Image: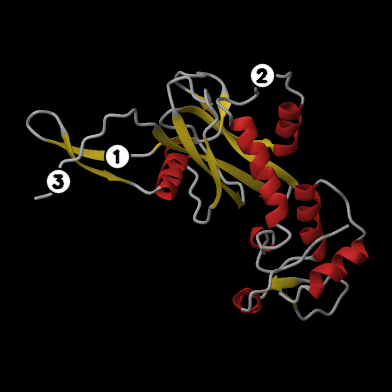
């Protein structure tokens, strides 16, 4: 018989939040997916998509919980993202836990945050979200950075989560081939440079940038007859590099 364990101490709630970056190839800008909250707390305020982890409980005849089953944190992040925005993301990177006292006025809530870089698609508000929309990321970040001390642009502590996610994105894009996966199967070096300049927030010398990217060894140059040169990501070369313990080093000074 399964033992029935009790617990006399307060138990914090667990939630997830997702920072979804989108790079628009045509507009050449980095965007962020935000929702307008449809419920309290912070009703009407912009926030990241997210919510509480789903738990199924079984109780005995006296109302005591005798069994609990929960979804994983990653499954929670994907589910909440889809419910609130209609956006589906396969690959997400974990940022870490956020547990600053008072981050949620409803009580003690620990959030495990994730981020992803995707191609922006249609979104719509759902569940707890009145609206979902893609906004220019650097405009949002500028507002966050200029908020008076003690005030926040986004609900809860989502300003801090966004800033940490952006720091990670700028780091990861230099060591992982995430930028190439946002482009068509064949792409130009100019398209690659546009992504890196937008994400990293600076401009690079064209020749130096091209040399650095080609030296990484993960791109194949496609046959061409004119001046337009196109490339594609060689997944096998990248996987071989990663399996050998090496990483991309697309660091531009």
For label 2, the residue is: 151
Q: How many angstroms separate mark 3 from mark 2 (CA)?
A: 48 Å
77 relative to 251, above or below: above
Q: Which numbered mark, 3 or 1, is in the foreground of this view?
A: 3
Q: Residue 130 shows which numbered tag?
A: none
In x, y percent, where is residue 107? 43, 23
Residue 55 numbered tag: 1
Sequence order check, earlier mark of 1 and 2? 1
Q: Is the C terminus in the top left, top right, bottom left or bottom right quadrant?
A: bottom right
The local secondary structure at tag 1 comes to strand
Relative placement, left or right, of 53 versus 149 is left
Label 3 Cα neighbours within 10 Å, binned few <14 / some 14-19 / many ≥20? few
> What whole-number distance in Å separates the C-alpha atoms at marks 3 and 1?
19 Å
Which residue is more in the foreground, 32 or 173?
A: 173
Figure quadrant of residue 63: top left
Sequence-wise first label, 3 or 1: 3
142 left or right, relative to 129: right
In the image: residue 132, left or right of residue 218: left
In this figure, which residue is indicated by the disc labeled 3?
3
- The residue positioned 59% from the left and 44% from the top of the image is 20
> In the drawing, does residue 217 fall left or right of residue 37?
right
Q: Position of residue 249 (x, y in %)?
A: 76, 66
Q: Position of residue 185 (x, y in %)?
A: 65, 68
């Amino acid at each position: 018989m399964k033992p029935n364990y009790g617990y006399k101490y307060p138990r914090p709630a667990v939630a997830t939040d997702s920072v979804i970056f989108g790079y628009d190839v045509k507009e050449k800008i980095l965007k962020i997916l935000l929702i307008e909250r449809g419920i309290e707390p912070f009703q009407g305020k912009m926030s990241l998509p997210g919510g509480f982890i789903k738990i199924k409980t079984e109780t005995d005849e006296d109302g005591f919980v005798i069994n609990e089953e929960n979804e994983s944190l990653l499954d929670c992040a994907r589910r909440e993202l889809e419910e609130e925005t209609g956006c589906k993301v396969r690959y997400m990177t974990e940022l870490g836990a956020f547990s600053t006292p008072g981050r949620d006025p409803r009580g003690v809530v620990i959030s495990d945050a994730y981020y992803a870089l995707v191609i922006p698609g249609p979104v719509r508000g759902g569940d707890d979200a009145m609206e979902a929309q893609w906004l220019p990321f650097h405009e949002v970040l500028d507002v966050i950075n200029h908020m008076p001390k003690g005030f926040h642009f986004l609900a809860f502590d989502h300003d801090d989560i966004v800033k940490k996610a952006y720091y990670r994105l700028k780091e990861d894009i230099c060591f992982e081939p995430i930028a190439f996966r946002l482009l068509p199967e064949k792409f130009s070096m100019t398209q690659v440079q546009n992504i890196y300049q937008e994400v990293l927030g600076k401009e690079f010398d064209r020749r130096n940038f091209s040399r650095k990217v080609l030296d990484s060894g993960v791109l194949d140059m496609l046959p061409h007859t004119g001046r337009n040169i196109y490339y594609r990501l060689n997944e096998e070369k990248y996987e071989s590099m990663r399996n050998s313990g090496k990483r991309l080093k697309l660091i531009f000074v």
